[in-house]
Image (cartoon, rainbow, N blue to C red):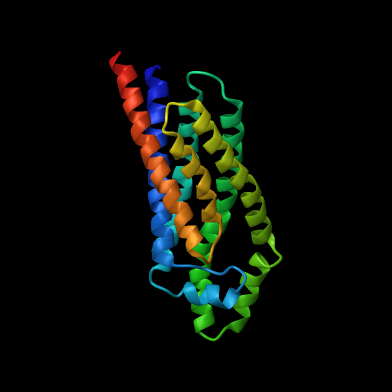
């Protein structure tokens, strides 16, 4: 392993673990949300925790993009792994598509909530247009279609690779539960991501340090 690859793996896996931490904090701070109920979503956006939670989530999503690259590099620097490549492409697509939605929650929804509190009931139509039949619904659907198999394929690749504890592959795959909002399953999913990514980062760092010593 050369120094460039070692840096890509180390910092990529650290970014993956940090993304798990930040996405967990997002869910804890904002609480459950119901995308099918625009008025409940607007009321939730009036919470003082809303903006910090979604700002944290935005940083977490960006870090995750780099994190999955680090995981891909770790799984492929010794030998080609088609499964990891497909998983990498799907996860990148899923999180890249989620950026506009997270930005909407962080930037636009608090403004909409302020207008709603001032008596402008018509702003609910903006939220309805995004999450009942609009672009937001399409992005959510495509993101889920890409993200779920991406997580599962990464889990299988981790299991087959053999250098990491096999249970980390199972737990990483179960992080797909993060895509189930409004229930405790969402929190469970991001915690699975945090746990698996933390252990993967630790093990990957140890391995890269051992190879650097050799």
Q: Quadrant of the C terminus?
A: top left
- Whether 64 is drawn above or below 126: the answer is above
Quarter assignment of residue 202: top left
Q: Is residue 82 above or below residue 213?
A: below
Q: Is residue 50 above or below residue 100?
A: below
Residue 81 falls in which quadrant of the image? top right
> Which residue is at a point 44% across and 49% down the rendered structure image?
192
Question: In this view of the protein, which residue sits in the foreground, 2 or 162?
Answer: 162
Q: Residue furthest left?
A: 213
Q: Residue furthest top?
A: 214
Image coords of residue 185 (percent x, y): 50, 59
* Residue 200 versus residue 212 in the image, above or below: below
Looking at the image, the residue that sits furthest to the right is 133
Q: Residue at x 42, y 41 (%)?
A: 16
Task: Count every numbered label the image shows and give the total.
Answer: 0
Would residue 212 be visible to someone looking at this image?
yes
Which residue: 59% across, 74% down?
A: 38
Q: Position of residue 111 (x, y in %)?
A: 50, 72
Q: Can you give x and y, in whole percent of width and height, for residue 88 in the image?
A: 56, 35
Locate residue 24 relative to residue 181 in the image: left or right. Answer: left
Where residue 110 appears, as percent x and y from the top left, is 48, 70
Quadrant placement of the N terminus: top left
Relative to 82, 3 lies left or right? left
């Amino acid at each position: 392993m050369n120094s460039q690859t070692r840096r890509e793996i180390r910092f990529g896996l650290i970014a993956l673990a940090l993304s798990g931490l930040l996405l967990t904090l997002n869910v804890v701070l904002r609480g459950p949300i119901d995308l099918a109920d625009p008025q409940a979503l607007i009321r939730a956006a009036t919470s003082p925790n809303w903006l910090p939670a979604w700002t944290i989530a935005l940083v977490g999503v960006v870090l995750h993009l780099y994190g999955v690259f680090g995981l891909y590099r770790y799984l492929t620097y010794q030998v080609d792994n088609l499964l990891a490549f497909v998983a990498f492409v799907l996860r990148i697509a899923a999180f890249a598509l989620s950026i506009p939605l997270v930005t909407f929650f962080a930037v636009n929804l608090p403004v909409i909530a302020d207008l709603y509190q001032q008596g402008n009931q018509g702003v609910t139509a903006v939220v309805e247009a995004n999450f009942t039949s609009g672009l937001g619904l399409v992005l959510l659907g495509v993101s889920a279609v890409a993200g779920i198999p991406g997580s599962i394929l990464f889990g299988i690749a981790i299991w087959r690779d053999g250098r990491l504890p096999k249970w980390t592959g199972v737990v990483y795959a179960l992080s797909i539960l993060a895509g189930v909002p409004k229930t405790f399953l969402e929190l469970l999913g991001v915690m699975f991501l945090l746990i698996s990514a933390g252990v993967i980062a630790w093990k990957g760092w140890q391995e890269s340090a051992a190879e650097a010593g050799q």
